[in-house]
Image (cartoon, coloured by chain):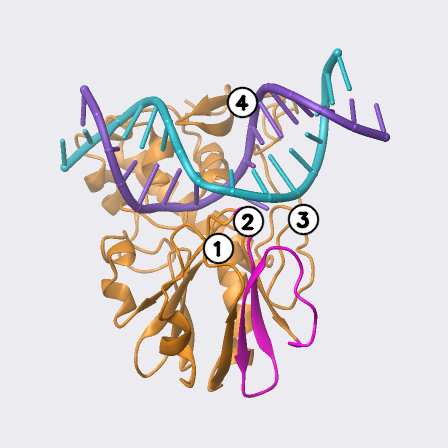
Chain colours: A orange, B cyan, C purple
Amino acid sequence: MPELPEVETSRRGIAPWLEKQRVVEVIIRERRLRWPIPDDFEAKLTGKTIRSVDRRAKYLLFNTDDGAAILHLGMSGSVRIIDPTEPAAKHDHVDIRFGNGKALRFRDPRRFGSLLWADDPLQHPLLRDLGPEPLEEGFDGDYLWRRARGRRVAIKQFIMNAKIVVGVGNIYASECLFLAGIHPKRSAGRISKKRMISLAGTIKDVLQRSIDAGGTTLRDFYGGDGEPGYFQQQLDVYGRDGDPCRVCNQNISAFVLGQRSTFYCRRCQR
DNA sequence: CGCGACTCCTGCCGGC
DNA sequence: TGCCGGCAGGAGTCGC
């Protein structure tokens, strides 16, 4: 998946095409996603006007005057704006057609994504208990440090926990910890407030920089305009095991933590 | 409650 | 060239 910057880039790409547009038709070719698309989804959305396209964590929210569609891209999902006469390819599960003649097409080969309906999306069980947005008020080093009291889990898993803070995926978790000089395996509760302030800063910086760069990290990501992502390798450690550390020249190490690949510099990170 | 393991699914890549 | 195993950006759920 798209990590948070990819989702935000997708949101910015598609929002101008959708806002104030009336949904004229919803075409669902495959309902079996992470959860089945609800049977009444088409009926709920058809005929309504999109008021805004918002994002909460990695969920895209298509708000109408009466309820909202909630879309999660999972690991392999993408959205783009198309001419609805364009034939659907394999894994193109949903088209939402609008009054302006365009359509939003959702593709998701692995089907880990989801498409749901909620009268009040922020109160939906999947969104209700989420932690703060990393780029908004309410997230800083003090907050991280307070939440880490008594927690023995590895800091990498801690910052990837959406109940603590949303939007830090596997790639950026490694990157942020490298920049903060913290070993991925260090217990969350054993990190000083000073270092947590540094970590919160790197999380904000990395996510903001990645959004500014158009969000793209890996090659199968498509922005809302359908153009391939930039695939810029601005990454310092992710996927670079064996390469020399940018700072100290030590080879970057890799190991598995909580079933996720993890990259770090054993000299720079303690 | 906190934590670790497991799970869903397809595509792709490297090794033989 | 083909087959097979392993791995991939997420995150909910279960069992201890």
Q: Are marks 1 and 2 on the same chain?
A: yes
Residue range (magenta): A83-110
Q: Are marks 1 and 4 on the same chain?
A: yes
- Badge 1: how crowded within 10 Å, few (<14), some, or many (20+)? many
Residue bearing mark 1:
A73
Measure the C-alpha gap from mark 4 to mark 3: 21 Å
Tell me the CA gap for discs 1 and 2.
7 Å
* Pointer 3 residue: A231
Looking at the figure, which quarter contains the C terminus of chain A?
top left
Would you say the residues marked 1 and 2 are in contact, meaning their CB atoms lie under 8 Å apart?
yes
SS at mark 3?
A: loop
Mark 2, residue position:
A76
Have a look at marks 2 and 4 and say if they share a chain: yes
> Does the residue at mark 2 contact the one at mark 4 (Cβ under 8 Å)?
no
Secondary structure under the numbered disc 4 in the rendered image: strand
Query: Can residue A208 be seen in the rendering of this structure?
Result: no
Q: Is residue A147 left or right of residue A197?
A: left
Q: Is residue A231 left or right of residue A189?
A: right
Q: Is residue A94 magenta?
A: yes
- Circle 2 sits in a helix, a strand or a loop, which is it? loop
**Label 3: chain?**
A
**Disc 1, SS:** loop
What's the mark number on residue A158? none
Residue at screen point 23% across, 64% down: A123
Q: Nearer the viewer, mark 3 or mark 1?
A: 1
Q: Which mark is residue A254?
A: 4
Badge 3 or badge 2: first in the primary sequence: 2
Residue A113, image x, y percentages: 46, 53
